[in-house]
Image: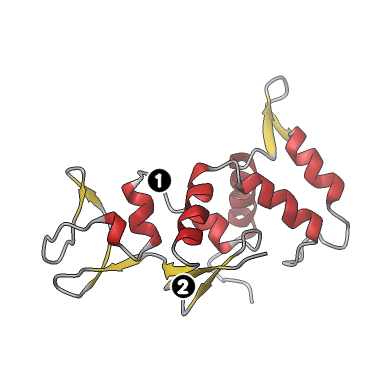
């Protein structure tokens, strides 16, 4: 079902912005228009006509985006953390060991502390991917986690993230 608040113009604008950020499109300085970059041309070569506009991806397209994801340090670090943490951990909300409440990690004055009680959280003992990435000053790679190109899946209404061996 189509979201009634989304217009075709907004959808196209978001797709162009995303493709530009991924390096698939680039601005042509002479004509001030967008054109496919070398990376975009590579993707166009492996994409079939039947795949365009469908949510499923072929193995070649998944492999292309998996290789592209590895260029981002937050993706590499997130996968390393998940592998080291036996494959499953909380995605966004951490639990404070002092007050036992859920919270979203934020860095304040160079330290991660619970906003409810002020308890300082040690990122090494945390069971939350977001907390561990924030401690390394990296953003959470939401786009890549929600895509189907990484060997990770979110579970239980996006509370947990699980790493699957290929």
**Residue 31 placement: quadrant:** top right
In the rendered structure, the answer to whether residue 145 lies left or right of residue 166 reads: left
The secondary structure type at the circle numbered 2 is loop
In the rendered structure, the answer to whether residue 12 lies left or right of residue 109 reads: right
Q: Residue at x 53, y 67 (%)?
A: 5
Of the residues under marks 2 and 1, which one precedes in the sequence? Answer: 1
- The crowd level at tag 1 (other Cα within 10 Å; few <14, some 14-19, many 20+) is some
Q: Quadrant of the N terminus?
A: bottom right
**Viewer-proximal residue, 23 or 136?**
136
Residue 81 at what x, y percent from top left? 45, 56
**Residue 24 placement: quadrant:** top right
Q: Quadrant of the C terminus?
A: bottom right
Q: Is residue 117 above or below residue 15?
A: below
**Viewer-proximal residue, 46 or 21?**
46
What residue is shown with label 2?
A: 158
Q: Residue at x 41, y 66 (%)?
A: 91
What residue is shown with label 1?
A: 138
Q: Residue at x 53, y 50 (%)?
A: 75
**Marks 2/1: CA–CA distance:** 20 Å
């Amino acid at each position: 079902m189509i979201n009634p608040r989304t217009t075709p113009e907004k959808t196209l604008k978001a797709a162009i912005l995303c493709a530009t950020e991924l390096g698939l499109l680039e601005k042509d300085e002479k004509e001030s228009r967008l054109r496919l970059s070398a990376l975009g041309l590579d993707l166009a070569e492996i994409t079939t006509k039947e795949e365009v506009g469908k949510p499923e991806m072929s193995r070649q397209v998944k492999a292309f985006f998996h290789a592209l994801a590895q260029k981002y340090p937050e993706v590499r670090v997130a996968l390393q953390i998940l592998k080291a943490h036996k494959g499953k951990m909380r995605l966004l909300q951490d639990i404070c060991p002092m007050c036992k409440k859920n919270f979203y990690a934020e860095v304040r004055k160079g330290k991660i502390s619970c906003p409810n009680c002020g308890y300082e959280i040690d990122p090494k003992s945390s069971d939350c991917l977001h907390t561990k990435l924030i401690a390394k000053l990296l953003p959470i790679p939401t786009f890549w986690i929600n895509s189907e190109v990484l060997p990770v899946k979110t579970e239980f209404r996006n509370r947990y993230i699980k790493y699957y061996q290929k």
